[in-house]
Image (tube, rainbow, N blue to C red):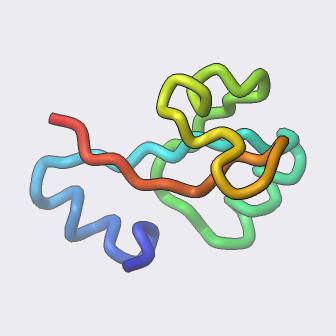
Amino acid sequence: MELHEEYQAISELDAQVIAISAEDLSLAEAAVEHLGLQFPVLYDLDGEVSQQYQVYGLLDKGMTTPATFLLD
């Protein structure tokens, strides 16, 4: 499921979608614009959040692995 395609349905469930990007700011902004994302995208340029959620370097050293988390 692509979260940006289901954003309205998720919002109607009183839930929130927040993306966190570790990409260079200009690359991330271009992706947000290209995909037409309606939810907030936060930037983790120093990788702190990626490391806390243990998704940094799982598949490739120096890269953050895409992941989805449900928090209550």
| Left or right of 40 in this view: 60 | right
Percent x, y of residue 51: 60, 27
Q: Would you say 36 lies left or right of 5 here?
A: right
Question: Which residue is drawn at the image coordinates 82% and 59% (left, top)?
Answer: 30
Q: Which of 62 and 44 is in front in this view?
A: 62
Q: Give how far across and how far down residue 9 sits, in percent.
A: 21, 70
Seen at 22% across and 62% down, the residue is 10
The percent position of residue 5, horizontal first and vertical second, equals 41, 77
In depth, the one of 53 and 58 nearer the eye is: 58
Residue at image location 14% in from the left, 60% down from the top: 12
Q: Residue at (64%, 72%) from the top-left corner?
A: 35
For the C terminus, the image quarter is top left
The quadrant in which the N terminus is found is bottom left
**Image spot of residue 16 (x, y percent):** 28, 46
Height in image: 53 above or below 9? above
Count of labels shown? 0
